[in-house]
Image: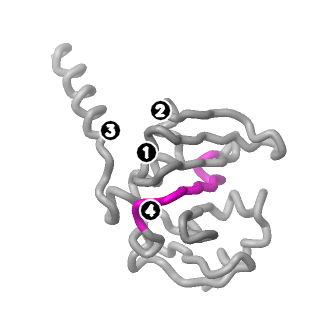
Amino acid sequence: MKRLVPLLLAALLVSCQRQPESGGSDLTSRVLFTANGSYDAQADQRGKVADQVGVRRVRWDTRPPLPAQAVTVDYDGEQRTRGWQMTLEQPGFSAAELTGASGKQVTTVEGDATLMVSGPLARVLVLSPTPQSLQLLTRGYAVQHRPQLLPAFDTP
């Protein structure tokens, strides 16, 4: 039994290292794992954001945990799971592929966006600030750092 545990852990680690296919629950799970810190050990940069109190940043350039050229997560250092913003540069998937049928189109002061209304990413706002990037953020992050986006979260 003692020999079986390391083998099972190794198999789990290898399966977690695979890059997911675009779309579907694998992509959703990978987004959540990235936001919540599961891949921080592989990040190229980790540290505090100088101009924002309590905000920390993790960035992947060489081996992003999602299909994108680079991934950056800014998060509340004390409540990461509730307050984060993820920026994907040159993503290998679209907002529509990520949100699927569980997204509701909303208008924000920064343009059109999609609010996830169900599933694991419920209450996450997906913005496309440029054709080459996506931003995802929680209401908790918007309360502290992007209050101009709060009305989008209150959409019925």
Work out whether 58 lies above or below 11. Answer: below
Q: Secondary structure at mark 2?
A: helix
Q: CA distance from mark 1 to mark 2?
A: 8 Å
- Asked whether, in this view, residue 87 is left or right of residue 5, the answer is right
What number is the disc on residue 17?
3
The residue lying toward the viewer, choosing from 1 and 39, is 39
Q: Residue 58 appears at what percent x and percent y?
A: 60, 40
Which residue corresponds to the image point at 70% horizontal and 46% vertical from the top-left?
A: 76
Q: Earlier in the sequence, mark 1 or mark 2?
A: 2
Q: CA distance from mark 3 to mark 2?
A: 10 Å
Q: Amino acid at mark 1?
A: Pro
Q: Nearer the viewer, mark 3 or mark 4?
A: 3
Q: Amino acid at mark 4?
A: Pro
- Quadrant including the N terminus: top left
What number is the disc on residue 82?
none
Q: Amino acid at mark 2?
A: Gln
Q: Amino acid at mark 3?
A: Gln
Q: Residue 14 appears at what percent x and percent y?
A: 26, 34
Q: Which region of the structure is painted magenta?
A: 80-93
Work out whether 135 lies above or below 10. Answer: below
Q: Which residue is mark 1?
A: 65
Q: Secondary structure at mark 3?
A: helix
What number is the disc on residue 42?
2
Q: CA distance from mark 1 to mark 4?
A: 18 Å
Give yes or no for residue 61 being in the magenta stretch: no
